[in-house]
Image (tube, rainbow, N blue to C red):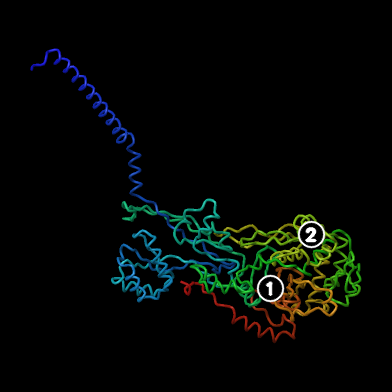
Amino acid sequence: MKRPRVDTEASHRLISRRAALLGGVQLAFVGALGVRMQYLQVDQADQFRLLAEENRINIRLIPPERGEVFDRNGMPLARNVPSYRIVIVQEDAGDVDAVLDRLSKVIALDPEELERVKTEIKRSPPFLPVTVAEEVTWDDLSRVSVNAPALPGITPEVGLSRVYPRGSDFAHVLGYVGPVSDYDLERIEDPDQLLRIPRFQIGKVGVESKIEERLRGKAGARRVEVNASGRIMRELDRREGIPGSDIQLTVNAELQSYVQARLSEESASAVVIDVDSGDLVAMSSSPTYDPNLFVRGISSRDYNALTGNKYRPLASKTVQGTYPPGSTFKMITAMAALEEGLIGPDETVYCPGHLEVAGRRFHCWKRAGHGWVDLQNSLKQSCDVYYYDLAVKVGIEKITAMANRFGLGMRHDVPMSAVARGLTPTMAWKSQVHGASWVVGDTVNASIGQGFMLASPLQLCVMTARLATGRSVSPRLVKSVDGVEQPSGRGTDLGMNENNLRKMRRAMYAVVNDRRGTAYGSRIIEDAMRMAGKTGTSQVRNITAAERARGVTRNEDLPWERRDHALFVNFAPYDNPKYAIAVVVEHGGGGSKAAAPIARDITLQALYDGEPPLDAYPTKDRGRIREQQRALREMRPVANIAGSDQA
């Protein structure tokens, strides 16, 4: 049946409206698409071109060459030498286990290290190289190269490795480098991106750590083209990094080597300072260790041997060790009294062997006492009672203030690890730390360097340098950086009465050169080289009244760790001081027997800038010294300047 005309026209109008609506929607969509395409292809073209370039081009850091370290005469102490290593790329190797098995037949490989390598390969992308062996010899490298066709994916590489040519001589000064650890990254607020390079090495302790940023240098960069999986296709350009700064230390390598040998295997330390400049020309702790063992990771056996040694070879005793200074502190007590005008050089104190203070008896080291003694004789014979008497007159606050002026109780600015502040106590300190009031007995103990008083060998050496010069000599360990001289440690005038300083120096001279002096056995015969010094013996245990009544047990009869520490400080030559020396022998017994002979030998070695003539020693000692010098020459290692043995 034919549809009515009216219905047909209505249907056409409806279709036309729908078509128009649909066409409008399509036109709007095409228009929007065109606008969007113009925005992306024209307006944002530069941005997307940059994004595409960044997807294709990567920036890779180039580790800089680490700065080297030298002694004051230009002798190398820390160097970079070529280091050969073997790496494997998993995707080129195919069957990794089979390739590593063949490699182990070509060169010797540690089974434990091989397991580590396999674990690392599983964690790494297949195109990244993994180190199989480091610091391989040239012979091993040659064997790998010759067998290259049978070792797919194995590649020999050359880089730089840190080496310490002087071995153990400078372990406690230089420290060592090692791979960056998670702990290293956590303690650095904004770590350099260099530190995130696998197996990148930084200073761990000592100078290597404290001057790390200058030694490290600045990274270079190379632009490389990579594919979608991140594999390097080619290198586009390269910008080399800035090498680290070369550091020249104030230490004298030959003197340091002698001091280290002279300390031998004692648990001891020695510091030598140039009193004119503050230069630390020797800083030795004994026993020591070889820092080369730590560069690529020390074995558990070697590390346990070091940590299990009761003499603590890993500790830098020169700056970390703090000890009761014992009688070496008596010059400070005397200077406090002299500067206050409380005593004169001729005033005497009677020593019956003890002094009663506040109902307690304080004993002198000499049970029978020294009788009447003045300032010079009290120091010469190390009479304790004389200084007990001074302490009661002066008081702890002035004694501590004087100690601070002479460099005790402060952390000296030297780039070494864990530099100790020591302790020069005050009334407020005891109240705050111990919650107890200061008593006069504390002052009496402090007057002879016992009780709470603590000092490091470095501080005792600075104290002696200031006594010798009257200047605020400060220790300097870095002589120059990239050839630029660093500030001197000469210091300014301490503001002390020069007459009082001369009295102390004369008394110290008598300690060594008067027949009744406690260090007379360690004197120097050569007039132009004569030294002034002071012995010290510090107790590490309490002596009970019962033991004192039956007789104090000799150090030789006690276990090592309960024996007294032996100390000695000196400067020389007396008339024109050049060096100040401090020696501490842990649990060595008496300072006159254990520490003074070592200090005398070091002093002569420094003054003569080499082995001194035998006629500088007392006649009775020359035969023994001749044999000692011969033995020390044999003990001192020949420096491996090129570092070839470690490479």
Using the numbered discs, state the Cα–Cα distance from disc 2 to disc 1 in whole angstroms. Answer: 33 Å
Point out the frontmost of discs 2 and 1. Answer: 2
Residue 71 visible here: yes
The N terminus lies in which quarter of the figure? top left
Q: Secondary structure at mark 2?
A: helix
Q: Sequence-wise, which precedes: disc 2 or disc 1?
A: 2
Residue underneath mark 2: 400
In this view, the residue in front, 480 or 551, is 551
Residue underneath mark 1: 607
How dense is the environment of label 2, judged by Cα within 10 Å: few (below 14), some, or many (20 and up)? Answer: many
In this view, the residue in front, 625 or 539, is 539
Tag 2: residue type? Thr
Task: Where is residue 74? Give x, y as percent.
Answer: 56, 67
Task: Where is residue 472? Give x, y as percent.
Answer: 73, 59
Most extreme residue toward the left is: 1
* Left or right of 301, for residue 435: right
